[in-house]
Image (tube, grey):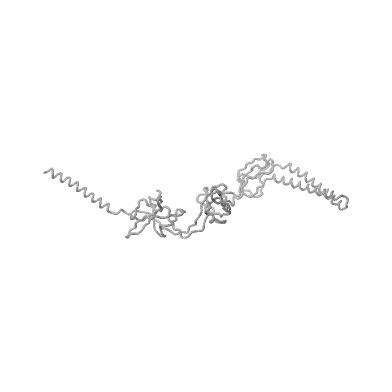
Amino acid sequence: MIVLVALTLLYGGIFGWKYIQSQKLAARASMPPPPATVATAHVERQSWQPRLSAVGSLVATQGVFVSNEIAGQVTDIRFESGQAVAAGELMVQLDDDVDRASLASLLAEQRLADIQFQRAAKLVNEKLVSRSDYDSAQAALDSAAAQVESQRARISKKAIRAPFAGLLGIRRVDLGQFLAPGSEIVSLQALDPIYAEYSLPERHLSELAVSQPVEVSVAAYSGRTFAGRISAVSPRIDVNTRSVRLRATLENPEQLLRPGMFAEVHTLLPAREDVLTLPARAITYNPYGDAVFAVEEVNGTLQVQRRQVETGEERGGRVEIVRGLEAGAQVVTAGQNKLRNGQSVEIDNSVELKGQVGE
């Protein structure tokens, strides 16, 4: 009997303790979870500037390799690599001593031809020479003058000048070097203004026009944009890519932009008013649709409800909301991964919360 009583008390105590524990667990499970702390933002109406984005290259408005037209030996170099030059500035002088000696001889022949012509002109009036002798003297004078001008032109071509104002590249000739006709002396690029050339799909052709504003950014100057305008729209559509070629002109007074740079070009379209936007971090992206957690007041407490939304363009950290929310709606921007429908929340926008999308 004593053993039976002891066993009864022992097992009774164990089962009683288990029952009390299960009741506590059931009561705890029935209690609502504590509110989750989240950060929020409101849907705002903004004015957005739609744009068509493309990639292209920067091209000099004028760019050539300065070269010589006549062969000769370099006797003088008047420029340095990387120097800015004005139009017509002397850059290289080729040896012209022989040409100048030939010019002196031709000038002497011209003077003789002029004397003979003047004599013939006087005598023809006195009918002492025939008209044909007079014509021959005039032709000889004209020929001598033409040879003088030809020789002067040859001498001038040995003084190689900048065809336009711009910035020089790396020098490719040395003093005393003999240059064959067409030798590359130095690159010359006109940098202000400068062109940006790029292409857009043909479906956008109706939205493009000359003088339309563009914004250009390059990797060398991150965060900075350069303004310009479309200066030419190609009349031909590329049959391989079905795209239209465009050229924009940009002012470049600081000469920061250089030919050959890779450029991101944004063609600006007419502004759109009353665009609904949200911070991009508020959107939960899924294969079956984008969603947000909207904050609503229910029976005096703040709760969240999952809302499917249709998004549009993304710009400057904000996303366009095409459908699913109204202006002024409050949505969660941090802490979404710990939320479920109907859960109570507390809002704290004073600190950066963990649990943001992508963390």
Task: Looking at this view, name the residue that lies furthest to the top.
Answer: 177
Expressed as whole percent of the image width and height from the top left, the position of residue 18 reads 21, 47
Picture quarter with the N terminus = top left
Task: Looking at this view, name the residue that lies furthest to the front.
Answer: 239
Instruction: Identify which residue, 266 or 238, lies in the foreground.
Output: 238
Expressed as whole percent of the image width and height from the top left, the position of residue 350 reads 39, 55
Q: How many numbered marks have been drawn onto this rendered protein structure?
A: 0
Residue under the point 23% across and 49% down: 22
Residue under the point 29% across and 54% down: 32
Residue under the point 17% across and 45% down: 11
Quarter where residue 311 is shown = bottom left
Instruction: Identify which residue, 327 or 355, lies in the foreground.
Output: 327
Instruction: Identify which residue, 243 or 75, lies in the foreground.
Output: 243
Instruction: Identify which residue, 171 or 272, lies in the foreground.
Output: 272
Horizontal side of 121 relative to 213 (left or right) equals right
Horizontal side of 61 relative to 125 (left or right) equals left
Residue 349 in view here = no
Task: Looking at this view, name the residue that lies furthest to the left.
Answer: 1
Expressed as whole percent of the image width and height from the top left, the position of residue 291 reads 39, 53
Residue 275 in view here = yes
Expressed as whole percent of the image width and height from the top left, the position of residue 320 reads 44, 56
